[in-house]
Image: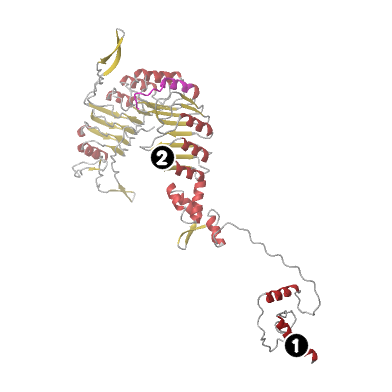
Amino acid sequence: MASSHASSASAPAAVVAGQPVPKKRGNYNCGRCGLPKKGHVCSVPTPTGDGRAAGAAAEQKLPRRALYFGETVAPAPAPTPPQPPEKKARVEVVEVESSEEELDPRGQGGWVEVAAGKRVPGEVVVEVLRRLTPRAVAASAAVSRGWRECARQVWRAAEELRLRAAGVRPVGALLPRCPALSRLVLRMESDVDATMLACVAFSCPDLQYLEISMADTAVNRMTGDELTRFVSEKRSLSVLKLDGCSSLGFINISSSSLSTLWISGLSSLTKSIINCPNLNELSLGFTQQNNDSTDLISLMDGLGRTCSNLRNLHISSIHLSNEAVFSLESANLRGLCMLSLILGSKITDAAVASIVRSYASLDLLDLSGSSITDNGLGMICKAFPHTLTKLLLALCSNITSCGVQVVTTQLPLLQLMDCGKSLCANSHPEAERSYFGEISGGIKFCSKLPTQRKQQPTNQKLIIKHGNLKKLSLWGCSGLDALYVNCPELSDLNLNSCTNLHPERLLLQCPSLKDVHASGCCDMLIGAIRNQVLNEFTSAEPRVPCKRLADGFKTCPSPKLHARTAIRGGEMGRAEAEPLHCSPELATDRIT
């Protein structure tokens, strides 16, 4: 009893002192007042502040045991406070399975969400995006993460890119996404300078094909030094096509990998050096300016030494002359297969004789805009009867229908022939020109007497009978009065602006004819063409008036043919007629 009273007296003393009794494991007494827990309701308030902290500290010093027997135990070492976690990049919390599928559409089982609750394989999305325009692919990347990864896949695997850009900035933002790009075609709507070449050179290390064309209002401001540096740095470039290069000043191109070079819009070149031993095709187009000072003679003379493997040559300039053709003969390009010298009004039959002596296996010859005559056509027929398949003689005002008939008779392999605006009526004489004459030590302007060109007959008839001819162009031949064409393989016939051709004197025997261009012709001629091509007579069906399109050209409506049936071997067959297409054909379009 004395001991129990002592314990009860000590408990209030501890409470009064503010020292809470620590709770020990294995002790069945109250931790606040010390009385047995069984049936006990403690009236001592819960200690706060330092008392609780001290009790917690004392509780932590004791070892964790199932029972407590009051022995003294060494205090356990204080636990090391946990270190704060390192800061990481903020990421979006997503499910693991869905994130893997979204971020790896190439993998097996990768799915991309295309609608609410609908998913398709990532490979399907990639194949669809490959068939869209670059603008559409860029817009699809903003749909979701899965679509963005599919768009990245398209850019990474892209080998060819055709882009219409308004400036250098969108091109520079897109090209770094295409590391495997090998073919680049740009249609620029704004001015272009050396920045574009630098962007292409940096972003496309393995580029093989580059084509840059200019819109109507855009200007190409590249210089000769910048073009020379670009070609020398691109070791893998094999095809280069540039448009509107009026600011070059000179050409100095040296490359062992370049095989095709097209440059148009040239003007007043002070130097022309093209050192490309593997070059196969060269096209140089000069502006039609009278003040062009380019030395074409030295240019053609150097091609034989620097471009010995040249096979296709195209030069367009109003300053082409017989002397330039003679220098081309001295270049000794024996392997030439295509020769195009257009807009050279000073090229005559003497230049044709030089061409005949120099080359023996021409496949294409284009002398459009020259002053050759029927005698020159005769030399061409004798020189290339077994090789020539394409002959273009547009804007050659000195040839006649007799010379054209001789060509179709003596060239059996001919497949394409263009005589546009060559057989014209009412040829106008040359205007008076002034020149400098020296009289008694002074300079005086003297007028040159007008020279009358060879007068073309007004009413000419043309008879063409050929077994292999597939395309025939007679656009602008206003001197034609009668036309007879018997070509079983002919599929394209151009009769635009044949204003004097009579419908009664037209005969077309071409069973394979598909396209007929008859813009600028009278309605009666269009009706005659339609009847002969479709094997239909006007008495069987009334003629439907032709419609005029928004661009001012006429089109021939296809008549409603009655279905004709024939029973062969128990099967029903239907013969359908193909409609006649009458679309305009531009004078500058050429098939090469």
Q: Is residue 14 visible?
A: yes
In this view, the mark in front (1 or 2):
1
Residues at circles 1 and 2 in contact by the CB criterion of under 8 Å: no
Query: Which of the labelled discs sits on residue 361, or is there none?
Result: none
Q: How many marks?
A: 2
Spatial CA span between label 1 and label 2: 103 Å
Q: Residues within 10 Å of mark 1 (few under 14, many from 20)?
A: few
Q: Is residue 566 magenta?
A: no
Q: Is residue 53 left or right of residue 207?
A: right
Identify residue type, mark 2: Arg
Q: Is residue 296 magenta?
A: yes
Name the quarter where the C terminus is drawn: top left
Query: Which of the labelled discs sits on residue 187, or is there none?
Result: 2
Residue nearest the observer in this picture, 109 or 571: 109
Residue annotated with mark 1: 9
| Horizontal and vertical percent position of residue 549 | 25, 43
**Magenta span of residues:** 288-304
Q: Residues within 10 Å of mark 2 (few under 14, many from 20)?
A: some
Examine the rendered structure and indicate whether residue 553 appears above or below residue 284: below
Q: Disc 2 on helix, strand or loop?
A: strand
Q: Is residue 272 left or right of residue 508?
A: right
**Label whose residue precedes the other's in the sequence (1 or 2):** 1
Describe the colour scheme in one phrase.
Answer: secondary structure
